[in-house]
Amino acid sequence: DSGAYADYGVNVGKTAVYGGLGPYAVDNVSIVSNTIYTNKVFSTAYRGFGHLETLWTVERQMDILSQKLGIDPYEFRLKNMLRPGDTTVSGEIMTKSTGCPVDCLSAVVKEIGWTGRKTEEERQKEWATGKIRGKGFAMIQKAPAMPPNTATAVIMQMASDGHIQMMIGGIDYGQGALTAIAQIAAQELDIPFDMVEVRRETNTNTNPYDWNTVASKYTFMAGNATIKAAHALLDQMKQVAAQALQSAPENLSHADGYIYNRHMPHKRISYKDMALGYALPNGSGVGGPLIAHGVYMADGLTNLDPETGQGNPALAWTFGAHAVEIEVDVESGNIDVLKVASAFDLGQVINERMVYGQVVGGVMQGIGSAILEGYKFSDANVLLNPSFTDNKIPTMKDMPCEVVPIYIENPQLNGPYGARGVAEHTMISIPSAIGNALYDALGINYYHLPLTPERVALGIVSGEKDIK
């Protein structure tokens, strides 16, 4: 439903199909995605880019199917999970470096102490207290939604004191892009982190190109470009040092801000002495101001074939899982999220504190989508809740008592140090996990979001087991 204008809605609808079945092996698939105009406010890009909605349906259906089959939902998912050698819905072959959804699910299920669904007898015992608890979990699968020819570039130059200044095309709006790029540059050059400055201001007239700072892909793309730029800068310094140290370039290494002869480590020269060019004993100069650039183009990606739906659209799949424990007030229908365990196979953690921030923020945003947020329209398509007065968002009182992040590291072969993106993923499938936990608590399947107190309470008093 794109509303009255196209904006970005068609891209959301298209991309949601890529992960439209979740991380499951299914032999026969037909998915049709239509983006339509309606007389409503327009739809656009939002965190998760269509995957929260598709995985709400997929992960709720996985639970409902397991109910009908009499199989534990954990075991049911394990039976159908993608593993190395399996093929994704779009035709990509899973490998160990693609990531492991099984590891993610097993980790969160263990963390919340899953022992199986409640029996009706157990529910009735808790019901008498007025509050009843439930546990549930759901899978996550998402790749960056971007054109297959997406590219990014960085520029790196050295100041006279050996500090590195970098210009990038991406924007840091709080997610930590500047920190990640500075870390990678410092790692490659083997200098202290505080000797790298990534310029915050971005000007399209002067900064290198970047397609967009979206899609949970910036550290992957710009990280690879930074590694290339650092290697180019080191190559320049080694050419200068080869003349200064009278050594062959292939005999030179770098460490602690120096280029040195690996066979005679005492023969060395500091980066800063070469920053603006190096003066030989006879006064002649070699080199010049040190400046390098790095470019990374997504390799081997394609659009989906319009006839078969097959192709290679994914820069990197990030798999994950959420598990939650909730408490439901059987009179008011209010849901309190007590604990969330979130596991992601992110290949390699670049900065643990930044990932933790993504997890906590994503969990809260997911809770908002699950139990609070949602447009209400009149029969004439007039928006009835256009402000935060009536369209609530989570506050600190909605924060779970405990959020447990779990990091699985199966390195991505073409990622920087094996890393893959984890930003939008932290929000996706929180609603699905809460919906599944709600069934565990009440024995009622709810089919629509948000799971507001009103909707939950009306479902309870209806006596129905399926609230459609």
Image: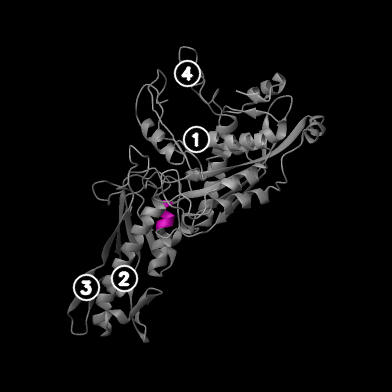
Q: How many marks?
A: 4
**Label of residue 54 in the image:** 1
Earlier sequence position, callout 1 versus callout 3: 1
Question: Disc 2 to disc 3, how far (Cα)?
Answer: 12 Å
Magenta residues, start to end: 177-181
Q: Are marks 1 and 4 in contact (CB under 8 Å)?
A: no
Q: Counting other residues with Cα less than 10 Å from the Cα at mark 3, is it few (<14), some (14-19), or many (20 or more)?
A: some
Q: Which secondary structure dominates the residues rendered in magenta?
A: helix
Q: x, y percentage for residue 72?
A: 68, 42
> In the rendered structure, which amino acid carries the disc numbered 3?
Gly
Q: Earlier in the sequence, mark 2 or mark 3?
A: 2
Residue at 62 percent of width and 51 percent of height: 106
Query: Which of the numbered marks, if any, corresponds to residue 234?
Result: 2
Say which quadrant the C terminus sits in: top right
Q: How far across and how far down the image is residue 427, in percent?
A: 53, 41
Q: Quadrant of the N terminus?
A: top left
Tag 3 residue: 287
Which tag, 3 or 4, sits closer to the chain's start? 3
- Does the rendering let one see residue 160? no
Mark closer to the observer (1, 4): 1
Of marks 1 and 2, the one in the foreground:
1
| Label 1, residues with CA under 10 Å away: few <14, some 14-19, many ≥20 | many
Q: Is residue 370 visible?
A: yes
* 307 shown above or below 468: below
Secondary structure category for the residue under label 4: loop
Of the residues shown, which amino acid type is indicated by label 4?
Leu
Q: Is residue 180 magenta?
A: yes
Q: Nearer the viewer, residue 423 or 204?
A: 423
**Which residue was labeled with disc 4?**
383
Among the 4 quarters of the image, the one containing residue 456: top right
